[in-house]
């Protein structure tokens, strides 16, 4: 069952009814001011940091879901009837309803009783504000006298404190209302130099800023007394809960349309110019007033919205494909790329599942996110890499998280997640392959942000490898530390106390738990670094890294192979995990993917054997589960993984991040049919048809789909902010479609499903535009026989870089 449809032309997902299984959200903002917005206008906004600079209040885990938002109320002043044009929070019946989530904007349109309202929400480029452009149309035969009320509930900035510290916060709230603009200035009198404003383009019939005055005693947002009676009370909040609400009266002739613009924004003043006049407690509005005036004008709004569209044309224009599969096209060309940009901007901070108050950017997450956006914004990928690398320690170890505002490592969580450092090698390698910019390797980068400790980025990569090499266990496999990619495999933590964090509790010592996953990752990273060393003429080092990869491969073959698949790890006591010797958790997906990505077992049949085991034991119609059999109960020696009921999250859920590793591995062994089949099983657009089962948004990936052991098999959770976005884009574009940036050029080496006759693509690579056509007889599964580059035959499958501005025609021909 579907709740909407894709409008591919307009790059929008159109939701056709408001009562989606879960709030289906979108993101506003591309630079510093961000918001989440649901299909019923729920959500909140923040400036840069979702915890510390939260502008508006949202109620997570509310019943019903999704309360707090950018709400409007329309009232028919002749009858007193009122409703929300976004359905929530009034939830009155609507004659029609449509929500269009687009690229950094959302449009919600509905009608009731001949009154149509369409609201466009977006954040203009270069601004720290959001625009709500409302068009109200009277489709009746008679004149209509209407009231329009806006509403937001202000958050008192620190979202964590806002939700907990009521003894203080019920007394700190303050606003100003000046020239019909509502200013929220809680704590402005003391250490905050910032405030929020909420303005309307029309003359006001009234306003409210005190929540209880607007709602009325013991009433909720579904039935504000102000809206019911059709008159605002001009309340000025002092303490309690400051809100912003404008009341506008509109008399509309039959057929008449009116545009009303609301602007909600964030502003800062220099500390010594906070007040006007100086010495008063009144906000100095000299800087912000012109901004407000400009954005209340319809022509500014129209131009700002057009500019946003052009911004997305630029970002998405560099990689476009036309394949026989519409679900592939729309994910690659629009939605998957869009999701990658959202993970770049938001990391794991704010979604319907992430409350915005968990702090920090993940070291491994950020490096992997990079794989999905480096081709769209290489300069910002460069900055991001340098920021991440600067948090690395001299040991090569890495803080697991760093703070986005200070860009410093987070001491609360610390280090010891032993896969972390290796992701830096993979991230940098992806950047250099994409851009050809080797200068980044010479860039001086400090360790732990210590001035004076700078060493070339290349040295950081070297230390990443050394970190693994210096931490090997009894089998010669890398020590796992607190966890590897699987945060829930906590082999050095034996926690029996409720509430203890599994990742940071270290209550035993002398642990020698080892990870086969990190071993595979090491082989991959060592080979990548060898290629980089070679590029720099360091043949000795290149040889050394290759030898290290070879050696680790040998260890994996000897101690990491279980007979029909790669083992997962060895626990604290040296027992294998992910082995047929256990009755649960016999086979895990991660090492099957990562070892093959590192090239382990490609030459001797082990890779193919492992992938067959994945197909036989882990693959379900909804995707590939993380392990089987699921752990039926808590195991002290395994940690958080066994804390989940079977079928969820890391305990045999379909952890979508890992599925593309298997797609890539299948492509590497030449099995395009199966690679693409796996791709489609978790592709959200394919799953749109079963939205009543999948339940999350059909336009973005979710972190997890419940596995076969769960009663809700097929149900997705944790949509939007997940490494799944980057890896799926890599799997489909670089391995299945085979358009793969390499150090020496752009490889064109697709591994396609048999039925495809080929595909076309436009790929911008190092400033040149490649117009690529792949032709293949349908029904065959062969690899590229030869390439024609501007009509000239080229040996192999790598197209050399053509230089900025060039347009290159590439034909890849598969003969049989
Ligand atoms: C989740 C993991 C996540 C970890 C982060 C766990 O509860 O299951 O997916 O990586 O928290 O700390
Ligand atoms: C989510 C975390 O953000 C990521 O770092 C981790 O690899 C996965 N969960 C798996 O545990």
Image: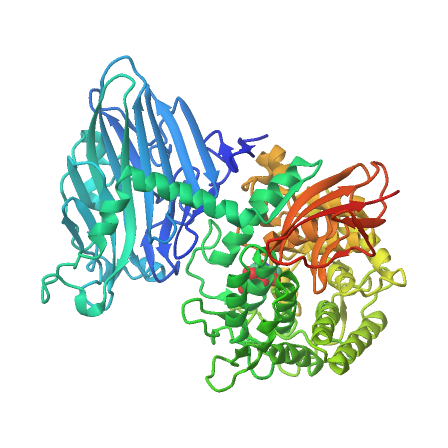
Identify whether 800 is placed above or below 773. below
Q: Describe residue 234's horizontal placement relative to residue 807 as left or right.
A: left
Q: Nearer the viewer, residue 114 or 762?
A: 762
Identify whether 456 is placed above or below 371. below
User: What residue is at 21 percent from the left and 62 percent from the top?
Assistant: 188
Residue 425 pos. (x, y %): 64, 71
Identify whether 2 is placed above or below 182. above
Q: Describe residue 496's horizontal placement relative to residue 150 as left or right.
A: right
Determine the quadrant in which ligand 1 lies.
Answer: bottom right
Residue 526 pos. (x, y %): 73, 73
Q: Quadrant of residue 549?
A: bottom right
| Quarter that holds the C terminus | top right
Residue 666 pos. (x, y %): 79, 52
**How many numbered tags mark residues here?**
0
Residue 647 appears in view: no
Q: Nearer the viewer, residue 342 or 567?
A: 342
**Residue at the limit of the structure toward the bottom, as seen here:** 452
Q: Quadrant of residue 767?
A: bottom right
Q: Nearer the viewer, residue 746 or 594?
A: 746
């Amino acid at each position: 069952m579907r709740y909407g449809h894709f409008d591919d032309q307009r790059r929008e997902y159109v939701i056709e009814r408001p009562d989606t299984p879960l709030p289906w959200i979108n993101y506003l903002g591309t630079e510093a001011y961000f918001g989440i917005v649901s299909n019923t206008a729920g959500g909140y906004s923040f400036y840069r940091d979702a915890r510390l600079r939260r502008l508006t209040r949202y109620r997570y885990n509310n019943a019903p879901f999704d309360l707090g938002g950018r709400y409007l109320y329309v009232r028919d002043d002749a009858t007193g009837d009122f409703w929300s044009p976004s359905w929530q929070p009034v939830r009155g019946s609507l004659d029609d309803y449509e929500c269009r989530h687009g690229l950094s904007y959302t449009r919600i349109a509905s009608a009731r009783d001949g009154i149509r309202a369409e609201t466009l929400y977006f954040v203009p480029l270069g601004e720290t504000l959001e625009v709500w452009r409302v068009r109200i149309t009277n489709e009746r035969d008679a004149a209509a006298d209407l009231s329009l009320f806006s509403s937001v509930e202000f958050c008192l900035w620190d979202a964590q404190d806002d939700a907990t510290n009521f003894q203080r916060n019920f007394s700190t709230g303050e606003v100003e209302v000046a020239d019909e603009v509502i200013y929220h200035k809680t704590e402005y009198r003391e250490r905050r130099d910032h405030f929020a404003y909420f303005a309307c383009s029309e003359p006001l019939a009234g306003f409210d800023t005190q929540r209880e005055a607007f709602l009325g005693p013991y009433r909720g947002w579904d039935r504000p007394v102000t809206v019911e009676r059709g008159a605002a009370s001009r309340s000025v909040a002092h303490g309690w809960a400051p809100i912003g609400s404008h009341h506008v009266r509109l008399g509309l002739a039959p057929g008449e349309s009116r545009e009303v613009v609301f602007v909600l924004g964030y502003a800062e003043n220099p500390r010594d110019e906070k007040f006007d006049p100086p010495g008063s407690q009144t906000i100095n509005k000299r800087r912000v007033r012109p901004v407000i005036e400009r954005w209340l004008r319809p022509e500014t709004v129209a131009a700002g919205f057009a500019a946003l569209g052009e911004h997305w044309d630029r970002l998405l224009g560099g990689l476009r494909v036309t394949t026989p599969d519409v679900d592939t096209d729309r994910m690659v060309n629009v939605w998957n790329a869009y999701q990658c940009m959202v993970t770049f901007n938001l990391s794991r901070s704010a979604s319907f599942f992430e409350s915005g108050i968990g702090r920090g950017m993940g070291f491994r997450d950020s490096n992997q996110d990079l794989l999905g956006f480096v081709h769209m914004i290489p300069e910002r990928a460069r900055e991001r890499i340098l920021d991440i690398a600067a948090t690395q320690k001299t040991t090569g170890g890495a803080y697991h998280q760093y703070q986005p505002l200070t860009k410093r490592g987070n001491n609360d969580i610390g280090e010891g997640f032993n896969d972390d450092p290796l992701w830096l090698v993979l991230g940098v390698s992806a950047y250099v392959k994409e851009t050809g910019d080797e200068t980044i390797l010479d860039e001086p980068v400090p360790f732990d942000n210590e001035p004076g400790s700078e060493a070339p980025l290349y040295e950081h990569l070297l230390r990443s490898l050394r970190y693994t090499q210096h931490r090997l266990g009894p089998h010669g496999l890398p020590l796992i530390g607190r966890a590897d990619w699987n945060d829930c495999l906590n082999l050095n933590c034996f926690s029996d106390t409720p509430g203890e964090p599994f990742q940071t509790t270290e209550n035993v010592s002398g642990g020698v738990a080892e990870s086969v996953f990190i071993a595979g990752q090491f082989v991959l990273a060592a080979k990548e670094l060898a290629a980089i060393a070679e590029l720099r003429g360091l043949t000795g080092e290149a040889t050394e890294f290759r030898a290290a990869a070879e050696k680790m491969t040998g260890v994996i073959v000897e101690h990491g192979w279980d007979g029909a698949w790669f083992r997962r790890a060895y626990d604290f006591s040296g027992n294998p995990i992910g082995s047929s010797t256990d009755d649960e958790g016999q086979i895990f997906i991660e090492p099957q993917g990562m070892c093959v990505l590192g090239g382990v077992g490609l030459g001797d049949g082990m890779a193919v054997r492992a992938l067959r085991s994945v197909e036989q034991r882990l693959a379900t119609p909804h995707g590939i589960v993380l392990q089987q059999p699921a752990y039926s109960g808590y195991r002290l020696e395994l940690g958080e993984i066994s804390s989940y009921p079977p079928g969820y999250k890391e305990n045999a859920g379909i952890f979508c991040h890992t599925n593309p590793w298997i797609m890539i591995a299948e492509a590497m062994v030449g099995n395009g049919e199966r690679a693409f089949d796996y791709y489609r099983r978790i592709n959200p657009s394919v799953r749109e048809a079963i939205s009543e089962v999948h339940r999350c948004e059909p336009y973005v990936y979710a972190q997890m789909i419940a596995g076969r052991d769960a009663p809700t098999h097929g149900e997705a959770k944790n949509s939007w902010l997940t490494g799944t976005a980057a890896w799926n884009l890599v799997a489909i574009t670089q391995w299945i479609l085979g358009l793969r940036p390499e150090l020496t050029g752009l490889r064109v080496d697709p591994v396609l499903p048999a039925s495809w006759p080929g595909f076309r693509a436009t790929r911008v690579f190092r400033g040149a535009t490649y117009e690529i056509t792949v032709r293949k007889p349908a029904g065959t599964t062969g690899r590229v026989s030869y390439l024609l580059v501007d009509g000239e035959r080229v040996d192999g499958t790598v197209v050399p870089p053509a230089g900025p501005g060039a347009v290159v025609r590439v034909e890849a021909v598969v003969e049989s």
